[in-house]
Each structure stands twice: as C-alpha cells, then as structure tokens.
Amino acid sequence: MKTILNTLYVQTQGSYLRLDHETLKLEVEKELKFQIPLHHLGGIVAFGNVLLSPFLIHKCAEDGRNLIWLTEYGRYKARLAGSTTGNVLLRRCQHQAVDSPESTLAIARYMVAGKLQNARSIVMRAAREAKDKTDKDILSKTAQIHAESIQNTETASDLDKLRGIEGYAAKAYFGSFTQMIRQNRIAFTFTERTKNPPRDPINALLSFVYTLLTNECISACESIGLDPQMGFLHALRPGKPSLALDLMEELRSPLADRLVLTLINRGQIKPEDFTERPGGAIYLSEDGRKTILAEYQKRKQEEITHPIVGSKIPLGLIPHVQARLLARHLRGDVPSYQPFILRG
Amino acid sequence: MFAADEYVMLSALQHFAFCPRQCALIHIEQAWAENIYTLRGLRVHEKVHQPGDELIEEGIRIERSLTLYSHQLGLKGIADVVEFLPDGTPYPVEYKSGSKKSRLADNIQLCAQALCLEEMLDRPVLKGAIFHHQSRRRRKVLLDDRLRSLTLQTIEQTRSLLALGKLPPPVKDKRCDDCSLIETCMPHAVNYFTESAHQNNPFLIK
C-alpha cells in the first residue's frame, strides 16, 4: 500500500468532476474551479448532487480508488466497487472464525479492550485538564469504570457478557461527555447518544464524523480483501457492515471523538453552525461540515508510531493497518488480533 | 501432466527467487501494492504489451506479449518480447523498469521463458536478454546448465509453496528496502510480534 493520500470531499451542489488525462478537473457551471493530479487522491467523497464523468468512475475502479456517494447531509448512499479481488482463502478463514465461538470471542475481546483503553485515555486526559472539581470527579469515576471494564474483558466468558461490559462503559463515557466540553457548554450539552436523526449538536457532530470513519473502515476491509459485513463483535444483520463497525470501535475515541471535542473546545465549531429541522432533528450547516472535513484531513495526516507495525504511520491509515493485522491473524501469520491503542 | 491450477506463473518464479514471502503475498494472499516502482513498470509494460508482431531490421521478427506455456514443466505466462532470428531461433527479451531487482531472479524468469519456447517451438534457446528500462541497456543472458537447473529447482519450490497456501515468515533483510509489498508483509509485526504484543497488551491498566 499506501501513503496517506488526500480524500477529496466535494460538497458544492452541481459540481461536475471529470478526468483530463491523469488529472481530475472540478467544474461548477462550466467554470473550472479546481484541478489535481489523480494520483494525489486516495478517494473521492461526493455529497449530494455531484456529477462524475463515466471515465473518471472507470479510472477510480481500475486504480482501486475509493469513490463514495453521500447525501448532501452526509448520509451514506453508495460506493464504487470494482471487480471482486483479494484472497478467497482469507474470506473463508474470516467466515470460519466467525463460526467458531472461541475465535470470535478472542478477537472481540481484543477489540473491546482496545476501544476501552482509547476511551479511557481521552477521559483521563480530560480529567487532568479539568479545572472544575465536579468535572474532575465525574471524569475520574468514568476512567475508573473503564479500568475495571478493561480487566473484565479479559475474563468475559461469552460474547453477550463482553457486549454488556462494553455497553456499561460506553454509558459512563457518554454520560461524562459534557464534562469534557469547555466552551459553549450550555449549547453543547450532551445527554445521550441519539441517531437517525441526531437530536442535539454533539450528536450531529458525532454522527457526521462516524459516517466518515465507517466508510473508511469499510474501504479498509475491502481493500484488504475482508468481508466488511462479517464481523466478530457486532451481530450479523443484513446490510450492516459489522466488521467495519468492529474495526471502528477502537478508533472512535482517538479519531472521531477527540476531533469533535477539539473543534468545540477551540471554538472552531459554534452553536450557529447547526440548524434545527421540524421535529427536532439537528443538522450541521455546510460551513460547519467544511470546518470538520478540513480538520479531519489534518488529523489524518498526523503520524504516530504504530506499536505493532513498528514504523511511523499517519493516523488516516490506521483502519487499513488494523484490517491488515486482522487479516494476518485470520491467515495464521500472527497468534492474536492486536488493537490499535493510542497511548498518552 | 499438470492440472490447470498447478501451472506456475512465470512471474511467480521471479517473485519466489527474490523472496518466497513476496511470492506468497502476491500469488496466495493476492496482495498487490502499487508504488512508484510498480507504476513505472506498468508504464514500461504498457508500451511493450501491445500484442502483435512486426519486422525490425536484418530480418529479425519480433512478437510482443506472446503467451508462453510448458505442459511438461507446468508453466504459463506472457513474454514481453520474443525476437525471432532469421533462422527462426527465438530470443526472449524481458523488460524490467528499474535496475533494483535481483539479477538472479530476473535470469530465472528469463530462463523459464526459454524453457517454454523450447517446448512450444521444439528448438533450442540458448540466449536471451533483460532490457533495463532505466539504463536503456540490454543485458545478454546465457541460458547455461547451471541457470537451467536453478530454474527447474525454483519451479518446483514455487509450486510447493503455492500448493501449501501458507505464508512463509518475512526475510527482514536488505531485500525489504526495495520491496513494494513491505506494508503488506509487515516484517516487524510478524518477526517481533510476541514482544510488541506484550508491550501493547490491551488488558493491562497503565
């Protein structure tokens, strides 16, 4: 693979993207707005009414470049899939592992423990930085719950117990999310996770960033040759990308939640960036989405040393690296799936 | 003699001779990573790989993208270029984008092409060449007995590896610097796994 390449997010309605030799050209009302060599792009995300020329679509399919269609408001619609590739033996191993309760539990255990480790880091960091005593206490309690939950994951006897442990910790985590917010706390009060539709600004932010991350995890599975629907921790349901959601668990805090908190705490996202629709659904404005996408891109370029791979890797490649580590485990190359834990 | 799925790709021999794990990653795990080297290779081959024949000077005819096979050895593949000398002797020329790859691996691939041509056309092929695109130089290769026996040995080893369907461990030596598959191979993750997994232990509270 793979250097971290930019993803092009096209939000302007009525944009037309076309291929000119090896270059992508973006036109709005027949006027050229932007052009970029295609090989600089790892993927294209098109929001709403964005047109792409057939030749550009073909080229993306040939090169294995991601092409994702979302609604104008960022809800997933479709993705480009080229011909089926990858190792059929790997997919078979994946299915066999899902059929085996022991293998499933072992993999799911590492995934949950990884997720809770990363959630705990965020909470502990917020507790250290909290000025208010009540905030500090609530956050410390959440960190404590995570520490206990992490230890319980190691001995959880089955998948349901494991999911129970995760659910309990997640409740504490979201229950103290407001305590991590230091700006505009009244407007950004968070009570519980609501989706479809999000009912407050934080939920709108989380839903938006989670959508981006889910898509990257699906792409990661597909590019490694794993079946994104065949998961270990998440139950199998028609249409649900269970494995992508599995991989995403350990990445939510470091890649998505931290970004949302930073944007609010630095005042880059403000209460004015949201609109309420009849019935109480809260949506992000186009400007708000723009800010998030720009910061998300920046965050993905940040490099960390991967504890297992042993080299420096941009955060944006972590879904791919984790999918690959899982593939290596499923193919018997390494004895366990090691989640990505961002220390510090 | 060989079942259809026991035929070994000529390119697999080159991969195997370079690194058995690379061979398994490409031909078993179906991993392929485009990087600057492979993209350059693609450009070079785009030009070479337009099937057809043409005449060049002094009565030498050249065939591009010629499908090769050997039923006796269980080999298949495509030759970049085969030149036919005026007396009909085939002369395989393999195109390489850089000068990075191990010469031995390239020579083995070329020799296997010659073995195919000998069977297909029933005449001896004693010479061939590697064209290095970077330096625009042609390097003549003598297909002597030593190279032939090494090639036969490589064919058998490659076939066994592919039949086994398992990944050999990473080599983790200077070959890795030139390898386009290093991120897929994850030599560190595999060779130092026990140590890194111990450090990474997700159940440990720090």
Image (cartoon, rainbow, N blue to C red):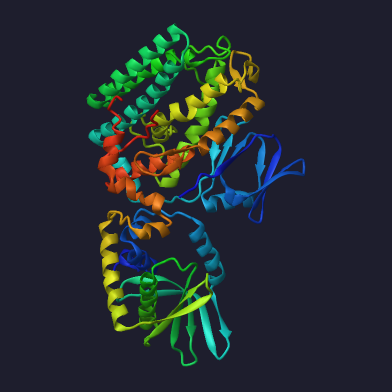
Position of A152 compared to A315: left or right? left
Q: Tell me which residue sits at (44%, 84%) in the image.
A: B90
**Which residue is most to the bottom?**
B87
In this rendering, the answer to whether B31 lies above or below A11 is below
- Measured as percent of width and height from the top left, residue A114 is found at 35, 29
| Residue A64 in the image: above or below residue B72 | above
Residue B117, image quadrant:
bottom left
At x 43% / y 7%, what residue is drawn? A133
Front residue (pair A315, A205) = A315
Can residue A192 be seen here? The reply is no
Q: Is residue A312 above or below residue B57?
A: above
In the image, taking residue B96 as reference, residue A243 lies left or right, namely: left
Q: Return the residue nearer the eye: B89 or B39.
A: B39
Q: State whether residue B101 is above or below residue B128.
A: above
Residue A54 image offset from top left, x and y in percent: 63, 50
The reply to whether residue A236 is in sight is yes
Residue depicted at 65% across the width and 23% down the height? A285
Question: Residue A92 at what x, y percent from top left?
Answer: 32, 46
Asked whether A282 or B33 is in front, the reply is: B33
Percent position of residue A47, x then y: 62, 34
Which residue appears at 64% of the width and 20% of the height? A273
Q: In what quadrant of the picture does the C terminus of chain A appear? A: top left
The answer to which of A252 and B205 lies nearer the viewer is B205
For the image, the number of numbered tags is: 0
